[in-house]
Amino acid sequence: MVKAVHYLNQFFAGLGAEEAAETEPTRLDGAVGPGRGLQAQLDGVEIAATVACGDDYFAEHEDEALDRLLALIEAEQPAVLVAGPAFGSGRYGYACARVVAAAAERGIPAVTAMHPENPGAGAAGRALVVPTQVNVAGMREALPVLGRLASALAAGRELGSPDEEGYLPRGFRRNRFAEQPGAVRAIDLLLAKLGGEVRSEVAAGFDRVPPPAPVQDLGTALLALVTEAGCVPQGNPDRLPTIRARGWLRYPLEGVESLSPEAYESVHGGFDVTLANEDPNRLVPLDTVRALEREGRIARLHDAFYTTTGNGTPVESATRFGREIAAELRDAGVQAVLLSGT
Amino acid sequence: MLAKEIERAGIPTVFVTALPTVATMIGVNRNVHAPAITHPFGLDGSERRRIVERGMEMLQADVTPTTVWEVA
């Protein structure tokens, strides 16, 4: 019998709901909450401890929380770490992803579970992510898959493909012998395509996200503004880099009707910001959106805008920024976004 | 990439960009073609309004993946 550690947020660990979202990393004995259901699905593995952290505490103290959680996890010397399921919860899913990614990097096999559109879904590094439904109604369906994969990881069993085993693709390539030569397989794909079925053995370079359903009526919607044009308050108080940004920033818009050149500027180092600095609304159209808000064309503008410098940003970083911002927008109930790029 | 991740979270997003070819290459779904890199939301208020309205139209429209709309 080997040991597992289970990571949960404050809510699933029974420590409280939103009011407990600032709970610091903590350890509980054995399996807690959904961990009990998970335990029943594990084979040869016992959940020795549950570690928990408040969703807000993790988001606001990411590196420190991660260090503390990993210390708690490593102290148990587990054969596997399981996190979640987080379903559609953005902050929780992101925390689960970061925790399992870090554990996997340190040699602890790890698996988490969440809805495929959860901002954390692509942030799990080498760890496995089991796709789930968007809310807790998917718990019954998720636990057996999570249990089976966790048991497999703990036993060191070699895993089959994502399709076979029920986890999300991680982008790794493995060599295996095909049953038929490439020429035969190519003709099969062509014949299938002629018959209307499009299949591919190789995924395209950039993945595709299906377009989300349109907003039914912007007049009842919460809209947010996001930019990668480096728009910041005058003087760049938080020192957003002009290139190779390490992160993003959020600035309040409550009571602000327009982005004046006295109060805002652009620090993007990849284009000439003269025109933008004459009128920052040219980057983030606050004046126009406020007018539309007054006219009732949109219900409300979100009380903050998000900004970063999209200049020389590696795809991996930009993806991470996007996930983090998406998690906040989702938690704030934002229903539509206008994003300006350069 | 920001747009894609926000879309991945299920929130309809319109990306206003002067480089829609790059946007569609990386897989952004709802794109409005901005007039210039230096001023994606136009120079003056009336141009800005047209661009924002086009974006709003797109937020409320069903689109096939990687679509680009021009602004009248």
Image (cartoon, coloured by chain):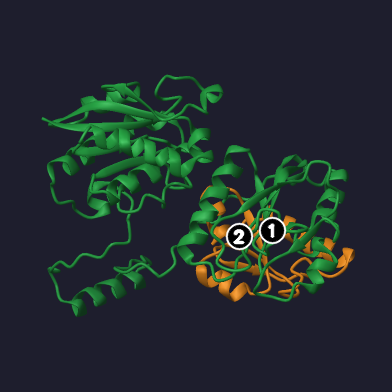
In the rendered picture, chain B carries what hue? orange
> Which disc number belongs to residue B63?
2
Q: Is residue A131 visible?
A: no
Q: Is residue A262 left or right of residue A41?
A: right
Task: Please say if the residues under marks 1 and 2 sit with CB atoms less than 8 Å apart.
Answer: yes
User: Which label's residue is closer to the chain start, 1 or 2?
Assistant: 1
Give the residue drawn at x 58%, y 58%: B3
Give the residue drawn at x 86%, y 48%: A257
Q: Measured from the top left, where is residue A69 in percent x and y?
A: 36, 36
Give the residue drawn at x 38%, y 67%: A196
The amino acid type found where label 2 is placed reads: Val
Give the residue drawn at x 12%, y 41%: A155
Q: Is residue A19 left or right of residue A239?
A: left
> Disc 2 on helix, strand or loop?
loop
Asked if badges 1 and 2 are on one and the same chain, I answer yes
In the rendered picture, chain A carries what hue? green
Specify the quadrant that holds the C terminus of chain A. Answer: bottom right
Q: Which residue has dot 1 on it?
A: B58
In the displayed orientation, state which residue is furthest to the bottom: A183
> Which disc number belongs to residue A133?
none
Q: Quadrant of residue A269?
A: bottom right
